[in-house]
Image (tube, rainbow, N blue to C red):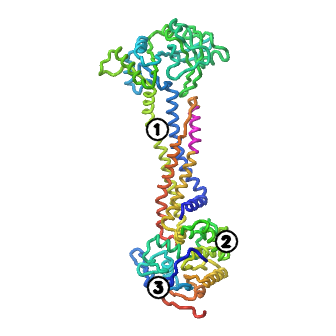
Amino acid sequence: MSTAPREAFDGPIIHAEDLWRTYQMGAEEIQALRGVTFEIQKGEYVAVMGPSGSGKSTLMNLIGCLDTPSKGRYVLRGKVVSEMNDDELAAVRNREIGFVFQTFNLLPRATALHNVELPLVYAGIPKEKRLEQAKRALEMVDLADRMTHKPNELSGGQRQRVAVARALVMNPAILLGDEPTGNLDSATGEEIMRLFERLHEQGNTIILVTHEKDIADHARRTIHIRDGRIERDEARRKA
Amino acid sequence: MLFGEAIQIAIASLRANKLRSLLTVLGILIGVSSVIAVVAITEGLDRYMSEKVLELGTKAFRLQRHPDIITSHEQWMEMMKRKRLNMDDYEAVRKACTLCSEVGAQVWTGSNVKRGRTIQKNVGIAGVTENISRIGTVRELLAGRHVVQQDIEQAAMVAVIGTDLVDAFFGTMEPIGKEIDVDGHPLKVVGVAEKKGAVFGESQDNFLWMPLTTFMKLYGSRRSFSIQAEAQTMGVFEAAQDQVRVAMRARRHLTYNKPDDFNIETGETVMELWQTMTRGIYVVTFVVTAISLLVGGIVVMNIMLVSVTERIKEIGVRKALGARRGDILRQFLVESVILSGFGGVLGVLGAAAFSFLLASILGNMMSANFSAPVRPWAVALALGVSSIVGLVAGIYPANRAAALDPVEALRNE
């Protein structure tokens, strides 16, 4: 889909170099990430996998620009995110990141269309253009006939598809899924995974954060995290 | 994010919690409407005072033995030592005040008036000069004629009566030419004065006028006169009063360092006294009602804090989708201002109803027309203040929302 034209960029989408993240818990210092380095190219389909407490959520927050590293350098589409302030981070999230959450995180009182429109509102795009783009995004996830429905009038799978449409509407650099099938039954989960597959084939860069091997297996590449470090970074064996 | 978006979001969120929003609005409504109503009632009372109580036009003033309102016992004792104003004083003032268009005199007593076996109690009985009804607030006649110069020269046994006496003695009968019994003296009714209604619950129509000379024949000359004068123009209002003052001081042989031992009252002096007496009460009332507005503001702040706490997750989502600090701040500030601004608008309507109600109750109590006007400036003030209250009450909660860490906020359930 097309949004505002953006400058061409042919370097890696993500360049992460020695990322550290430490939290202060009372007197204790917890090192959630201890020097993580990786690159993700445009159009890749990557799973970040690890057990709970491995640091994968912390890594996801850094990749999603919700947080900044304590140490290290994080470059997203050529922009040095690790040195940005709150408002710059908000702008990057708005422009470059499409979040798909485990719990959907749709606004309960807003219609599907309005939920999808939200990132465009914060991008300052005028009303008419917003509606047009939001409708197109909903069509992409096959929900053109559910635009005026509120989340509680939709099934779990439909809700997650609305969330995917919302993630896509700004045509972001990466689509970042955080356990996107965690709250869905396996059949619906498969349906969402097929949607991701399709989006990948259309050229979107996708990163899934998960602890389920079945889900990670959909990706072309898996980064295994354990104890705040990258344990393994492997491409899928069969194509 | 545009302002219009913020307003839409705010309205949607207020509508989602209708009862809560309504109760919050009620707090502001009460505050705003009581402030406006207090201003309206205050002004209504002042206006009522100046119109009804004074009965003095703008160019008229009154020379009296003592002021209308005495505020202490000491003052009263002092006043009782003063000399009465008599016929000679009246003549002297009339000669001295060349800037006056009219100088008249009246002297009052109270008594019962009879006709046949009907008794009308506590009738105000006045001896007047022929011009008295033309000085200050004009009193027209319903029927018959006024006391005239000839009546005064002859000390004629005639009376102009108020409508209360007409109602008591004559009903629908023709009163002109009939006789009434004033303290054992028969007076012939020659005129009926127009009805004035009541002031502070006291009828203004239970009176009769007779010629000044007749009054002195019947009641003696021990009562002090009230000398009423009207300046030719507004421009010589002060000068006319000075002429009277100089004449009186000369008659009383007062040296320059002695204060006046008589009193000159104008509409202004009475109003000033009324205002100094009532201003304190008004200020206290205003402050008390302003406190209710403050309480309304606290209610708004409380609800906004609740609203922020409930929506931490939503704030996290919005931030994840690209909302900046300012976007979140604006969203909650707008919500807070709409909440209390709406209360302000309703408060203005409430105030109009409230002051109308209060005015009619007060009017009933005083059995007179009484209006409490809702002033545009009071409305503007109330709306402005309620919006500012909303803004101030919203700043802290909105700031808290805007400062939330997106990671923490998203984790909130």
Q: Nearer the viewer, mark 3 or mark 2?
A: 2
* Extreme residue in the right direction: A145
Q: Measuring 60% from the left and 85% from the top, which residue is drawn there?
A: A215
Viewer-nearest residue: B326 or B205? B326
- Counting residues from the N terminus, which is met first, the one under dot 3 or under dot 2? 2
Q: Residue A103: in sight, yes or no? A: no
Say which of B243 and B118 sits in front. Answer: B243
Q: Can you identify the residue that label 2 sits on? A: A154
Numbered label tally: 3
Q: Which residue is mark 1?
A: B282
Q: Majority secondary structure of the magenta segment? A: helix
What amino acid is found at the position of numbered circle 2 in the picture? Leu
| Residue B130 horizontal/vertical position (percent) | 52, 13
Quadrant position of residue A165 = bottom right
Residue drawn at x 56%, y 32% is: B370
The reply to the same-chain question for discs 3 and 2 is: yes
Mark on residue A10? none
Q: Is residue B84 above or below residue B370?
A: above
Labels 1 and 2 share a subunit = no
Residue A82 in view, yes or no = yes
